[in-house]
Image (cartoon, rainbow, N blue to C red):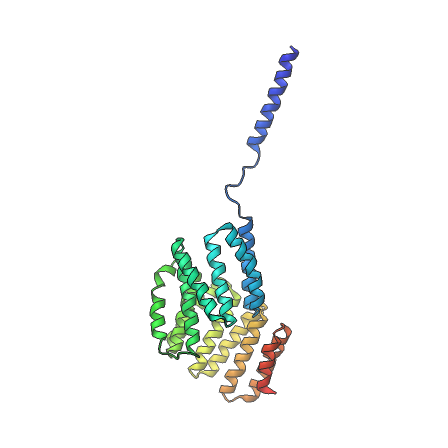
Amino acid sequence: MKRVNFLFTILFFSLAVFSGCSSAPKKATEIFTDRNTAIKQLALADYTANRGRYEDALVILDGARKLALSTDDPSLRLRTSMSRGNYLFALGRNQEAFAEWKSAADEGDASGEPVLAALARIYSIRAQIVLLDTEAGASNADELKEQLSRETAAVKSDDNATAVWNITLGLAEKQMGRWAEAENAVKKALSYHEKELFLEDTAYDWFLIASIRSMAGNYDKSLEALNMAIRFDRRAENGFGLASSWQAMGDVLLKAGRGGESTAAWRRAAEIYRAIGLNNLAEKLEEKYQ
């Protein structure tokens, strides 16, 4: 009898153990810890870059990039590579930037990420258009616009990529002096960014619209757009964006023959640059009015 009771006790505890195992939380079928950390670091890097601190952004991005590589996540590999290209271009390291975007585009095509592959090519096209202002003039803008059109189908299902596409189209149209078409393209991106409450992107859209209007000689409307950019950058507490818009406002006011007001705008921009630690930009600007 004792032996029966003993076996019963063993069986009971065995069943309890197995029963406990079956009611325990199931193990995750996939772990996202490192990938989630990479996403947060990438967001912080982009946030830092949007405030003009590109060297700092590269340092932060390095951590996200290592996690993207260690987890072999295709999307993160591509996104960190594209951001690195953007930061390098902002620092004037153009060859490195173009190499980064090409690598991302090639990898995206090979790994079945058509939207991100197209986005990498769009960033490259956008940079080439920006460089036309100082290097090649407007002669190649139409060709770059044609290259951009080839990416339309790939990005049309992704709102964010479509917005980048429209911004790039706006820059191409601006380069060709097609002011109305340029503004209309940027406003398509603006509509999306405003709807999604992307404050910094919305501010940049208005900044770009101001540039288009200024080049068209419509200075009053350009100033209106810059005031909108300032409004959104204030909401985002983006000092770099604010300083950039005040600096642009000074430039537009000078073109409009309002020299006294332009000096006040430049001075305000310089104060903001100094407040956020970008003394080199403040000093360059102060040379205009001192």
Q: Position of residue 105 (x, y in %)?
A: 41, 60
Q: Position of residue 74 (x, y in %)?
A: 45, 53
**Closer to us: 188 or 10:** 10
Work out whether 159 lies above or below 210.
Answer: above
> Which residue does the image show at 57% across and 74% down from the upper left?
242
Using residue 99 as the reference point, say whether residue 145 is left or right of it.
left
Residue that lies at the very extreme toward the top in this rendered image: 1
The answer to whether residue 158 is visible is no
> Which residue does the image show at 48% across and 51% down from the upper left?
73
Residue that lies at the very extreme toward the right in this rendered image: 2
The image shows a total of numbered marks equal to 0
The answer to whether residue 154 is visible is yes
Using residue 249 as the reference point, say whether residue 98 is left or right of it.
left
- Picture quarter with the C terminus: bottom right
Q: Position of residue 89 (x, y in %)?
A: 49, 70
Looking at the rendering, which quadrant does residue 140 occupy? Answer: bottom left
Work out whether 26 lies above or below 265.
Answer: above
Looking at the rendering, which quadrant does residue 6 occupy? Answer: top right
Q: Position of residue 14 (x, y in %)?
A: 59, 24
- Picture quarter with the N terminus: top right
**Closer to us: 95 or 1:** 95
